[in-house]
Amino acid sequence: MLIRRPKSWEMPERRATPESLFLNRRALIKGAGAIAAASLVAGCDEMVTSARAQAGDDPSSGLYPFARNDRYQLDRSLTDEEVASTYNNFYEFGSHKRIYEAAQALPIRPWDIVIDGEVERVRTISFDDLIAQMPREERLYRHRCVEAWSMAVPWSGFPMRALVEFARPLGSAGYVRMETFHNPEIAPGQRQSWYPWPYVEGLTIAEATHDLAFLVTGVYGKPLKRQFGAPLRLALPWKYGFKSIKSIVRFTFTRERPVSFWTEIQGSEYGFWANVNPEVPHPRWSQATEEVLGTDERVPTLIYNGYGAEVASLYANIVGEELFR
Ligand code: MTE
């Protein structure tokens, strides 16, 4: 991915308070405050829920594990949970892979999701009300980052098609635009003003309603940890990982094609379609092989990350566009 160099007037990292210490202390103070407030305001459900989530007791944990849907099989071993949980891309919390500690500062309750744009009725729904109504299952998926590493994980969640049906888009909607939370106070990366926050991604309605498009609420049989994009993220196994937006707060149905975060930063390297193809190199590196996280292996990358039989027809009539970047 593109990593911008800090300007000369910015404080070098070594002179700043280590982010993890700073954020841990803030999280501790905030968590203690939330618990005290919750005990004072007896019966105030929202605060109790919020304090429990801060303390790591996710209010949706009783729903897990979800029944596995065996239609989704892997050709490789699952990535070790510890490895997948400590090597993440979440630029809101830093432009490196070890963001898991910093990400713990993200408050995940209350968590409201807005559904708007070209829909019958604009509405806001809490994450817990949404997950309660959705058809929940577990799927084993491969994940291929544009940076040429990959993992295989058991995602828990529900088909994105169910969300689209719930949203009731109008016939005029051709795309769905998704947006991540925006809160520079808790996400240090969002204080880096050269990035076009909030993180945005988009899909055509045909892609969003494809059987493989999966909205993720959990992983390894438990609610999502914050570093994976709690409480709600996307998994699109046939596309480069940057399309799988984390910590979603808004779904907007649009006529126009949305411009995503990475496309806005560097459109020649990160496009709208971003389908995996080993034969189309990134302008700065090869996409022919991938490093399998947690192993010493590099394996050949597959067209559409191995999901071509299912998804290639989505793109059969698209001409004159770069489908693989
Ligand atoms: N979503 C948000 N909001 N912010 C991000 O930085 N990174 C993307 C994607 N979704 C990102 C994001 C990239 S580049 C990848 S590869 C995956 O999240 C990484 O998911 P993982 O950390 O669960 O492996």
Image (cartoon, rainbow, N blue to C red):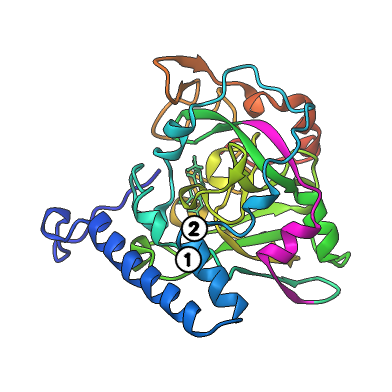
Mark 1 highlights which residue? 107
Amino acid type, callout 2: Glu
Binning the other alpha carbons within 10 Å of mark 2 as few (below 14), some (14 to 19) or many (20 upward) gives: some
Asked whether the viewer can see residue 14, the reply is yes
Task: Tell me residue 63's x, y (percent).
Answer: 70, 50
Q: Nearest the camera: 113 or 126?
A: 126
Q: Is residue 271 visible in this depiction of the protein?
A: no
State which quadrant residue 128 falls in: bottom right
Q: Which residues are magenta?
A: 122-141
Q: Residue at point 66% right, 64% down?
A: 127
Task: Please give the label number shown on residue 264.
Answer: 2
Q: Is mark 2 within 8 Å of ligand 1?
A: no
What is the secondary structure assignment of the residue under circle 2? helix
Relative horizontal placement of residue 238, taking residue 35 as reference (left or right): right
The quarter of the rendered structure image containing the N terminus is top left
The quarter of the picture where the C terminus appears is: top right
Which residue is found at the position 24% from the left and 53% from the top?
5
Query: Quick one: 198 or 274, which is closer to the camera?
Result: 198
> Badge 1: few (under 14), some or many (20 or more) residues near its Cα, within 10 Å?
some
Q: Residue at x 59, y 17 (%)?
A: 76
In the rendered image, residue 305, in percent from the top left (x then y), is placed at 62, 27
Q: For numbered disc 1, what is the local secondary structure? A: loop
